[in-house]
Amino acid sequence: MESTQRWNKKIFSLLLEKAKGDRSWRQFAFDSGISYVQMRKLSGMTQENPPRPKLIKKIALAAWNDIDLEDLLYAAGIFPPDTRKKVKRQKSDTFLDRFRALTPKGRSSVEDYIAFIADRESERMSEKQSKQNKD
């Protein structure tokens, strides 16, 4: 495996949150076979370096909500050597061009990720609005 991009803590954290499902962080760490402290560092974006592939594989095996090893490796900036050329893009590529080039599974993952972010933002706005209404 080789790294061709930088470690994206925020995306990795969001993927972990989705992969966790309705379990507690402690339960998800236990199910993954990693320490709770390690899981909290990754989910809280406090770990400076990306996790190693072995640890990512453990998390992927316990992941829910269609989060797979490939998703987590990508967020960690790790790609198999044969996919590097696919990831490189021309400066003229737009998001839509790259989205159209994805496989159906890849498109589904992007759509799921966007829906996850939209739901999360909607929840935050609702909480903020209800808090303002109380004041």
Image (spheres, grey):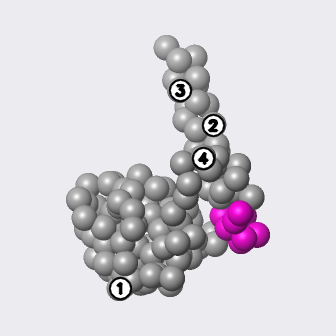
What distance separates the C-alpha of mark 3 from that of mark 1?
39 Å
What residue would you read off at disc 3? 128
Disc 2 residue type?
Ser
Identify the mark nearer the N-term, 1 or 2: 1
Identify the mark nearer the N-term, 1 or 4: 1
**Foreground residue among 102 and 58:** 102
**For the residues bearing labels 2 and 3, Cβ distance under 8 angstroms:** no
Disc 3 residue type?
Lys
Assess whether residue 59 is covered by the magenta stretch: no
Identify the mark nearer the N-term, 3 or 4: 4
- Residue 37: x and y in percent read 25, 68
What distance separates the C-alpha of mark 3 from that of mark 4?
39 Å
Per the rendered image, the range of residues in magenta is 101-109
**For the residues bearing labels 3 and 1, Cβ distance under 8 angstroms:** no
Q: How crowded is mark 3: few (under 14 residues within 10 Å), some or many (20 or more)?
A: few
What distance separates the C-alpha of mark 1 from that of mark 2?
35 Å
- Residue 8: x and y in percent read 39, 57
Q: Nearer the viewer, mark 2 or mark 3?
A: 2
What residue would you read off at disc 2? 122
- Secondary structure, mark 1, is helix
What residue would you read off at disc 4? 92
